[in-house]
Each structure stands twice: as structure tokens, then as C-alpha cells.
Image (cartoon, rainbow, N blue to C red):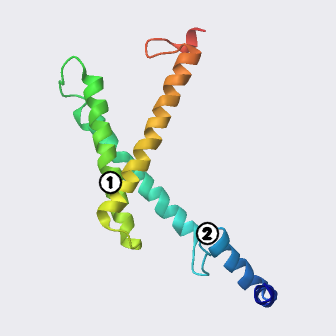
Amino acid sequence: KEDATTAIMAMSKNKEFFVDLMMAFELELEVPSEDDNPYFDGLVTFCSFVCFGFVPLLGYVVLYSIDLGDDKATVLFIIACCLTALMLFVLGALKTMFTIQKWYAGGLEILFFGAMTAAVAYLIGLLVEEITGFSEGNDCRRM
């Protein structure tokens, strides 16, 4: 106990080192380096969101004028879901270029968390629809 107290007292003399150590080991947060640029990071995130987010909409853009039968909306929705799953997997696989994770594990991880997030969002939408009484055929402007 005395050695631990001595070590803590020595580390606490250098406040920056002590804060970095606490962030890394206690809070499990990465200490940002001086080279980090939040504007560049934000731009990369935005571009990723636009590129990866546009792909699932391609089914609606490309196939909208094609006759897909009576249940066209369902077919387009299923295509959008499949394209979303594909893009989530690709995003996870690309993420592994910067980690030590295997490409397929990263792809499956992002696919899993993305699918769970989408499922929760969908269920919340169903709940809101049930609570408010609005559905596809109801027009909220008539209230």
C-alpha cells in the first residue's frame, strides 16, 4: 500500500501525465494526440455518412420506375434493407484497416450493431404509430 501511495504521489506531480493515465486506464478513453484535427475527423465522418447512407437509397432511385408488381413498396424496402446490411458490413470491414481486428469480424460487428440500432428505431416508430394512431393511410394535417 505504501508503494502504491508513493507511485500515485509521484505521478500526480505531473498533472498532464496523470490525467492521460487516468483517461487511458480508468476511463478507457484514447488520449487525443496533438496531430488530431477534429474538423478533418468531422469531414471524414460526414463524407462516410453521405456515401454509405446514399447506397441504400439507390434501390428507390434506380428501380422506382420499374414494375415490381403489386407490392412494390415492400420490394423496394427489402432491397434497401439488403443494401444497408451490405454497406454496414463494408464499413466494418474498412474500419479494420485501422485496427487489429480481422476484416470479417469488423464487418460482422458493425452489421450486428447497425441492425440492432435499425430494429430499435423501427420498433420505436411502431410504438409511436400505435400511441398516436397515425399510420400510412392517416394524414396528420386533418387533425
Badge 2 crowding class, 10 Å Cα cut-off, few under 14, some 14 to 19, many 20 or more, is: few
For residue 29, the mark is: 2
> What kind of residue is marked 1?
Phe
Give the side of residue 103 with respect to residue 27, left or right: left
Tell us which disc is closer to us: 1 or 2. 2
**Residue, disc 1:** 89
Residue occupying the far top of the picture: 142
> What kind of residue is marked 2?
Leu
Between residue 25 and residue 87, name the one nearer to us: 25
Residue at point 33%, 42% (across, down) = 56
Quarter location, residue 11: bottom right
Residue at point 70%, 75% (across, down) = 22
**Screen quadrant of the N terminus:** bottom right
- Point out residue 86 in the picture as x, y percentages from the top left corner: 29, 49
Residue at point 81%, 88% (across, down) = 2
Q: Is residue 58 above or below residue 25?
A: above
Give the side of residue 139 with respect to residue 103, left or right: right
- Point out residue 141 in the picture as x, y percentages from the top left corner: 57, 13
Is residue 76 visible in this depiction of the protein? yes
- Point out residue 44 in the picture as x, y percentages from the top left corner: 47, 63
Is residue 61 visible in this depiction of the protein? no
Residue occupying the far front of the picture: 1
Q: Is residue 133 above or below residue 1?
A: above
